[in-house]
Amino acid sequence: MRRTLLAGAAAALGMAALPLRAQSNTRIAFGYTAVTDFTTVFVAKEEGYFDKRGLDVEPRFIPLNPSIPAAVQSNSLQMGGPTPSVFLQSIDGGLDHVVVGGGGTTDKNLTGVGLVARTGSGIKTAQDCVGKKIGVPGLGAYLHVTFRAWLKAQGVDYAKVNFVEAAFPQHSDLLRGGSLDAVVTGDPFMARILASGTGYVASHYTTFMPDGMHSILFTARRDWAEQNPAAVKAFREAIVEAAAFVQDPANDATMRQHIGKYIKLPPEVLATIQIGPPGPLVSEAQLAYWVGVMKEQNMLKTDPDVARLIVQ
């Protein structure tokens, strides 16, 4: 069913004919973090889907997701992949950015994200997190916001948890050294922690969320998007084509090689990590879901007009 929907999306974007080309090989510096939610960007780059549409896309690694909107605003990046909460907070703070497309989405069958506690910490339940130091790869980012929503659903006051911002690659060392009691993390970093014996999974907490909600949004400044409409459409075409590639089991090995190039995973880790369903197109309902989650956590002062935030 999902592959059929992607095929339909491709046709709707005009991919049945010649792909739309941007003018003069538009250069796009694209900011990503070390997670597989960016797989469609990696695939589109490596399979030539950007190139054939006149896009010169340069993926650039950004250690912390909350840094992406500022880099887009300064034009250090023309596009980037903030989490929905980071994006909406930047809008709430006055930045005029728009959604061009989407990365990975939630799926109740995914177990590559969770609360990983330090071995010997004794953390087993949401209540055990009270008073503990828990690392998150970006305050206000996807994992932080969703974990707080889970704590609230479990009847725990998340204000009583001490959250510490820590980039994914630091998680294992911070647990091992005792600086943190637990981390909210994901593969491949979770797999490495478990393999080393440094920590254990206390909860695959994201399974409480509905399926199909984006964990990453692909965004740009509104003025840049308005000045480069052909590039925006060509970028979206490319990630829709990449999403279809990702969903084809015959491409699994090649897809994992592309991921490994950008987030530097060893072959044994690449072979086992789960890849979430791609969501190249973003709907108003999907974005509105995140507005609701953030409103519940008093993270927004305004009421974002989600229709205005998505480039058509």
Image (spheres, rainbow, N blue to C red):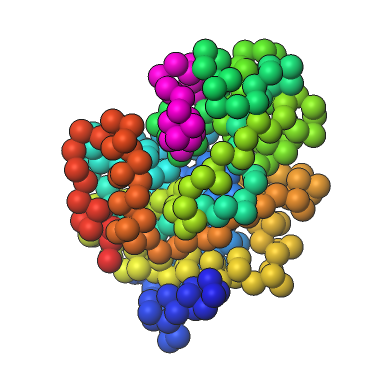
Q: Quadrant of the N terminus?
A: bottom right
Q: Is residue 240 left or right of residue 250?
A: left
Q: Residue at x 79, y 49 (%)?
A: 267
Vertical placement of residue 71 versus 159, above or below: below
| Nearer to the camera, 310 or 121 | 121
Could you say which quadrant of the image residue 94 lies in?
Answer: top left
Query: x, y (%) of residue 49?
Result: 52, 69
Whether residue 27 appears in this view of the structure is no
The quadrant the C terminus occupies is: bottom left
**Residue 24, how many percent across, how many down?**
36, 67
Q: Is residue 8 left or right of residue 247?
A: left
Q: Is residue 44 magenta?
A: no
Which residue in the rendered view is the most extreme toward the bottom?
Answer: 17
- 257 relative to 207, above or below: below
Above-or-below relation of 10 to 170: below
Total count of labels = 0
Q: Position of residue 228 (x, y in %)?
A: 28, 62
Q: Nearer the viewer, residue 245 or 278?
A: 278
Image point (36%, 56%), residue name: 286
The quadrant holding residue 196 is: top right
Is residue 44 rendered to the left or right of residue 119? left
Tell me if I can see residue 270 in this picture. yes
Does 152 appear in magenta? yes
Q: Which residues are magenta?
A: 146-165
Q: Nearer the viewer, residue 290 or 65?
A: 290
Counting from the top left corner in percent of width and height, residue 229 is at 28, 65
Q: Residue at x 33, y 32 (%)?
A: 297
Residue found 69% across the figure and 70% down from its top? 249
